[in-house]
Image (cartoon, coloured by chain):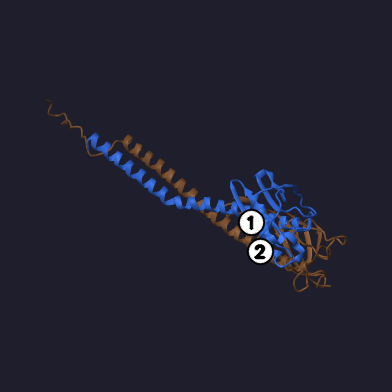
Amino acid sequence: MDPLSPTPQPMIKNKKSFTLLEIAIVIFLFSFIVTVVSTIYINLTNASIIANDYYQALENVRLGSEKIWRTLKYGWNFNLVNNQQLDFQKKDCTSASLKFNSSTKTLEYIEYSEGNPLNYQAVFDPNLVKVNDIIIATDTPRSTQRYDYFQYSTKLIVIYYDLEIKSKRGVTSSLIFEQAVAPLNSVYQTPRCQ
Amino acid sequence: MSIKQKAQALVLTIFIILVSLGVVIVLLMPINQQVIKVRKILDSFQALSNAETGLEVSNFYAIKGDTLSGYSFQTSTVPYPGSDCENFVNNMDRIMCRGNPNCGSRAEGIIPPNDCDITRINKDIDNSINSTIYEAVFKRNYDYYPYTKIISTGRLKNIERALDFDSWPF
């Protein structure tokens, strides 16, 4: 052996370590599983938020339609201006109107004082509900009817709602239904508001 | 660490991660159910609203026999010799004609066979979502017979809401 040549070092073989390939495989598997889990979690969390938003919007629709029902139930002198506007008098004989505004996509409830709009309200919260279409239908009192009961007042009002409930996540769902109101005051033969 | 130990560590790690994944999904299942529930609530709300509207429209049609401007529906009236109709008419006659001499034999609560009519009122709301209203009205086949049984069914997708009402207008 040449005494000048360096002593050959024995190759170090650490049996306790992992190779690069093994670590890469573990990282890949871990990343894959974390991605799957986080995707499921995010989707379900989003779905939960959307469900809550829908529920809130539905409550708003219920509240709005309940208000319409209550107002029309005790209304007088209904006048169907067109199939998207109904003028009437409230219980206290002041004038009011239910009108679909196609430009703002809202259903408006307007109260009047001496012919001038006094109070304006959107029936449904525009942040929660978009109104695509409203169709209002009523029967027509006829003086030729056999009974007085049918001669003077509107007996039935049907409102067709085509709504879209909105979520903060930008997702929407359609809500299409009808609501019927039989005005209570129609039992009188003559209107109480002149 | 031997190759066998490494394999064991890898299998153990993957097993723990998969179990964690399963736990997360199971814990999130109630949220998923909540979403499905809200969908059903929306459908149910629409079906019930349609059924309620059908009830009012049927009642109006039964009393006034008239249509509404801007609201079209189809009607068809046929004899309805069913025992449920006869029982209803007999009961109403028996109750309403008690002590009324004008009722004649109706006060006894016995009607001849085939003395019932059923009027079916169909209203399509929106065919695109398969939403329909169906109403059945049956009564004694007199022109101005006031007591009417109304069954209104609102349907949306696979949800059905039925309302039953005995009309007694006067």
Does A91 sit left or right of B46 as displayed?
A: right
Answer above or below: position of B93 versus A18.
below
User: Which residue type does callout 1 highlight?
Assistant: Asp
Above or below B85: residue A14: above
Circle number at residue B164: 1
Q: Residue at x 17, y 30 (%)?
A: A8
User: Front-most of A156 and B98?
Assistant: B98
Of labels 2 and 1, the one closer to you = 1
On the question of residue A104 being in view, the answer is no
- Which chain shows up in brown? A
Given contact means CB atoms under 8 Å apart, are the residues at marks 2 and 1 in contact? no
Display colour for chain B: blue
Which element is circle 2 on? helix
- Label 1 resides on the chain identified as B
Please identify the quadrant where the C terminus of chain A is shown: bottom right
Image quarter of the N terminus of chain A: top left
x and y percentages locating residue B154 in the rendered image: 64, 51
Name the residue nearer the viewer: B83 or A4: B83
Residue at image x 13%, y 26%? A2
Q: Where does the image place residue A66, in percent across and percent down from the top left?
A: 66, 63
Cα–Cα span, label 2 and label 1: 21 Å
Chain holding disc 2: A
- Write down the quadrant of residue B51 in the picture: bottom right
x then y, percent, for residue B68? 78, 55
Give me the disc on residue A135: none
Q: Position of residue A193 (x, y in %)?
A: 81, 72
Q: Residue at x 74, y 56 (%)?
A: B62
Check the image and name the residue furthest to the right.
A144
**Can you tell which mark lies on residue A66?**
2
| Amino acid type at image mark 2 | Glu
Query: Few, some or many C-alpha atoms within 10 Å of disc 2 (few <14, some 14-19, many ≥20)?
Result: few
